[in-house]
Amino acid sequence: MNTSDSEEDSYNERSALVQCESPTIPSYHQDHDMSLPQETDTKRGRPVSSGLDEPGLVERERAATPDGEEEELTLKYGAKHVIMLFIPVTLCMVVVVATIKSVSFYTEKTSQQLIYTPFKEDPNSVGQRLLYSLLNTIVMISVIVVMTIILVVLYKYRCYKFIHGWLILSSLMLLFWFSFMYLGEVFKTYNVAMDYPTLAMIIWNFGVVGMICIHWKGPLRLQQAYLIVISALMALIFIKYLPEWSAWVILAAISIYDLIAVLCPKGPLRMLVETAQERNEPIFPALIYSSVVVLSADERQRNEGGALAQEGVESEDDVALGGRRRCSAEEDLEEDRGVKLGLGDFIFYSVLVGKAAANGGDWNTTLACFVAILIGLCLTLLLLAIFKKALPALPISITFGLVFYFSTDNLVRPFMDSLAAHQYYI
Amino acid sequence: MDLSSVFFIGNIMNLERIPNEEKLSLCRRYYLGGFAFLPFLWLVNVLWFFREAFLKPTYTEQLQIKSYVKKSALGLIVWVAVLTTWITIFQHFRAQWGEVGDYLSFTIPLGTA
């Protein structure tokens, strides 16, 4: 079964923290959807990108309070944001690692590959393997770049319906097809008999409620849970279908691309953000992970009687949903503050940790990668607090993760093994 | 109710911040949607609107929301009963049904009869 198209689509959507609903072009990974901060708070006079769902975009929304108060609130809620981001990222990674460790399907290498990685790695020759993985990476990154550019163009020319429709198609595929595959493999692993009618009910319910929660209205927690599940499913697909060395090179390349796309003036994601800010419009939420924190009563009073709702993490599937800023009447200052993290980020973090878990390494490697990613996330949020604009969330975490993975695998593990072999405890 | 929720397109974050009429409409839509073989939707409806319907001070639309929550709960219980019965029957008699059992099976456990 060649699921590359569908995977591509979801890949596109997922990774970018793009605000607008980028149409997920089948050929493009959905995951690599850079999301733009969607909502800008014009009233504040500050561009706020919300819902940037780029693999690395972490966007912080500013409160409308005067600067001094804002700084204070910023610092106060900085830690909260970090915690709010830790939990979903950790959950996603836990789901992926648990599946990898228990369901062998996702670690069995098949000869099938995504069409985005056309070159088959030959395990016998190092040089050829390296070359092919580089070529695969080039193919994939160029696909991603093309997708992002198309997304920007579509957004610029206001083809919202197209984007929205595409997003719906891709999440449909994810919610139904991938979860069907996943359930099938889990049942096979646990040797459980399952009949078609019950299975149909389960998949139907899961998928439809997921669509409703994500694209329409639903309880916040459920929506967050669905986004985590979707990211985990996508990460599992990547882990299965990307060849070994290509996966690592692709991870590295995507973080570099993320850095470029978000920070360079001509970068597509940055252009998306700026366009969204110019237009000051909220883009329909593609897939946004948001956790809302409502301030306590006394804090509420401090804010001119307005309720300040903090948005936690918003991860948007590639398409960032605009920041959730809403200001209703003048006297009613409602402001959603939060940090938005793209779903693509979730996916790539999970891919890294999942591959660390899959490569037969013991838990040392997996835990090391996990800690590395969280540290990277903290640093990124710190930078966000300092710079106060859209930042790529992938580079720092992925760099740390890769460094930790390779060093743990090659240095720490043999060390621990020989320590254990010689019964020498430190 | 604050107007901010009105501007929000899409997901509802917090049930507190939307007006009562919208709550009612949402509850009703979830209830009606559940008829499309979606007991999960009814479950979500019950859990989400439970506080609104039973633990909040009365407001105009609360009575209707209560009725929708109750009806959703009822539908949910019916579906759970049906599914449990079917699953029990299937798991118990699958091996005995021979070919029909295999035809209905998505996964067949290995190593058992």
Image: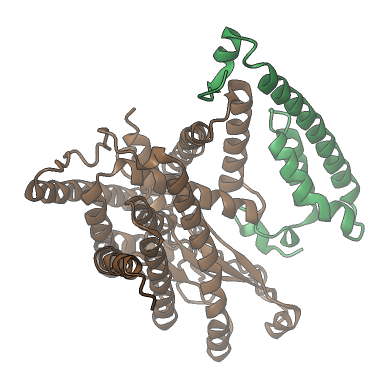
Chain colours: A brown, B green
Residue A248 falls in image quadrant:
bottom left
Check the image and report above or below for A218 versus B1. Answer: above
Residue appearing at x 25%, y 33% in the figure: A111
Q: Can residue A147 be seen by looking at this rendering? A: yes
Q: What x and y, as percent, mark residue B8?
A: 61, 57
Check the image and report above or below for B37 versus A209. Answer: above
Asked whether B105 or A169 is in front, the reply is B105
Q: What x and y, as percent, mark residue A134?
A: 15, 51
Where the C terminus of chain A falls, by quadrant? bottom left
Residue at the extreme top: B99
Where the N terminus of chain A falls, by quadrant? top left
Asked whether A159 or A63 is in front, the reply is A63
Residue appearing at x 59%, y 27% in the figure: A199
Q: What x and y, as percent, mark residue A173?
A: 46, 35
Task: Decide if residue A49 is on the left or right side of residue B97.
Answer: left
Task: Decide if residue B90 is on the left or right side of residue A58.
Answer: right
Residue at the extreme front: A422
Q: Can residue B25 be seen by looking at this rendering? A: no
Task: Decide if residue A293 is on the left or right side of residue B20.
Answer: left
Q: How many marks overall?
A: 0
Residue B104 falls in image quadrant:
top right
Asked whether A164 or A29 is in front, the reply is A29
Residue appearing at x 44%, y 48% in the figure: A101
Q: What x and y, as percent, mark residue A166?
A: 42, 40
Residue appearing at x 47%, y 76% in the figure: A46
